[in-house]
Image: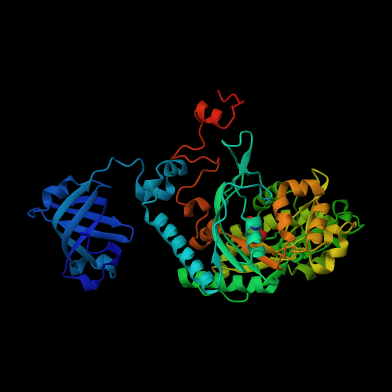
Amino acid sequence: MKRTAMIGHLTPAHAGQTVTLQGWVNRRRDLGGLIFLELRDRSGLVQVQVEPDSAAFADADRLRAEYVAEIEGTYQARPESQRKGGLADFEVIATRVKVLNTAKTTPFELEKGDSVAEDIRLKFRYLDLRRPEMQRNLVLRSKAVAAVTEYLDREGFVQVETPMLTKSTPEGARDFLVPSRQNPGEFYALPQSPQLFKQMLMIAGYDRYYQLARCFRDEDLRADRQPDFTQLDMEMSFVELDDVLSTQEGLMAHVFRETMGVDLPLPFPRMAYMDAMNLYGSDKPDLRFDLKFTEVTDLFQGGEFKAFASAQAVKVIAAPELTRKQIDELERIAKQNGAGGLAWLKRDGDGFTGGISKFVTAQAAELIARTGVAQGGTLLFTAGEWKKAVGALGAVRLALRDLFDLAAGGPQFHVSWVTEFPQLEFDDESGTWTYMHHPFTAPHPDDLDLFGTDRQGEIRAQAYDLVLNGFEVGGGSIRIHDPAVQAKMFQAIGFSAEQARDKFGFFMDALEYGTPPHGGIAWGFDRLIMVMSGATSIREVIAFPKNNRGVDLMALAPSPVEPGQLADVGLSVALDNS
Ligand code: ASP
């Protein structure tokens, strides 16, 4: 190899030495007869000076932005007057330049990367990935993988790969299907998660398992979702909830320390789902700032103010002083999130003005006492069905965070657990009970008797979510290992024995052959790296992502296929795409 060092690995100790560097021309400037180049590789950037009488000049003169070049020269300190401290104080005086390859003019200026339309960046992703920001994100990701592997290996976890072409695993999304040529009319499903396989690895005695698993979910896309994504998937035998949580805390702290030098305070705080919803209106509360809700349902029950009198829940948040325009915007957000409206009051002395003030004179003193709202401050209320009222006010809370930059006052990273999720949820649309996490999650042992009663909505699951800065970055549970409890669970969600057998017969068989108590978790690895890197979309931490319409703009996937390929798998396309 001709290269003597990566650019970013040069140090002041190299001063005076002859170096050979290889990389891309970041920029070229001609000044006073000299050519100034910036040469870039993954590790850094250095200025190269080519003097007019140098043997390197003719070749250097051919270089344009993004040409690939090899440069030999002397690494030396820049003239005193141009030094600012740091490695930029050094430059290379070229003695030889070799053009290793030319490049077309790029369709966007790499340095403008962030402000370029995302579709262009995605279409020319190999150019976008040359940008230092993208390289930083992918290197951070790679370091996080290394830290995870190191830690879990030390803790005795065994890395096992599970199949990509498999049977449906229920995680609440649609499956991506793959037709089978050898079994016409039949389909594989791509895994929504390795859930059943990792549980079978516990049945098989592997004790501790992990995998960086590709998962596939056909659902509506958002900034923090992709149709194919990566989970750090783990499972442990002979554990209880506390064991899983403390292993995870050690792992997460290790990853932050190794990759970013950040020490996370341990243990992570835990909050029950009902508290998270009642206090913050979210099952993934951003706890970098407080701003809790106050419960005021009782103050209005059966009272004069009709909108609140019969509401299942009335919640209030004490915001700083707000303009009418800001209140209108917050009301729009509340409505978008399921509220009928957003009632408000402005504190004025010992009472309130504006909004619904004429209806709350009797409650004014108590509202001030409970909320502690400041003079001039605004109270914002949602009322109605509990889940909608808290959810909408939760969205308002996040909008207030953004409006007043509330998270800036807290720690850079706040990690916490949300626990005690409901085992079952009533789905209004289908009029049936369904699982909240997945059907293999163990209920709390004290709540087993509630199955099949009118209180089954109160059954607590031994499930937990890992929350970082308001993002769900992991979720898991202790699993059902008793076939009788598994049968109860299937029954509760309206799965007949035949349906369960048809979908997961292999797994139900396995459960009967000595299943150890076990539990696990999966991290949304892309999402975690997104938050760690400060990016606002997981597309910024995935090398070749799809856009928000699920399209790979570079490879142009999905795409139609040859009729012959369809015939091979016994399919034809019935849609008219014209
Ligand atoms: N399979 C679950 C999920 O993907 C994670 C787990 O329960 O371990 O959400």
Does residue 495 appear in this view?
no
Q: Position of residue 470 (x, y in %)?
A: 62, 61
The image quadrant where one finds the C terminus is: top right
Query: Front-most of 168 and 146?
Result: 168
Position above or below: 266 against 526: below
Q: Position of residue 3 (x, y in %)?
A: 22, 60
Left or right of 158? Residue 293 is: right
Query: Front-most of 305 and 256?
Result: 256
Looking at the image, what colour scheme do you see?
rainbow
Q: Residue at x 62, y 50 (%)?
A: 192
Query: Front-most of 316 and 6?
Result: 6
Q: Residue at x 46, y 44 (%)?
A: 118
Q: Residue at x 70, y 50 (%)?
A: 331
The image quadrant where one finds the N terminus is: bottom left
Does residue 297 appear in this view?
yes
Q: Position of residue 30 (x, y in %)?
A: 18, 50
Residue 102, quarter of the rendered image:
top left
Quadrant where ligand 1 appears: bottom right
Residue 250, quarter of the rendered image:
bottom right
Q: Position of residue 494 (x, y in %)?
A: 82, 48
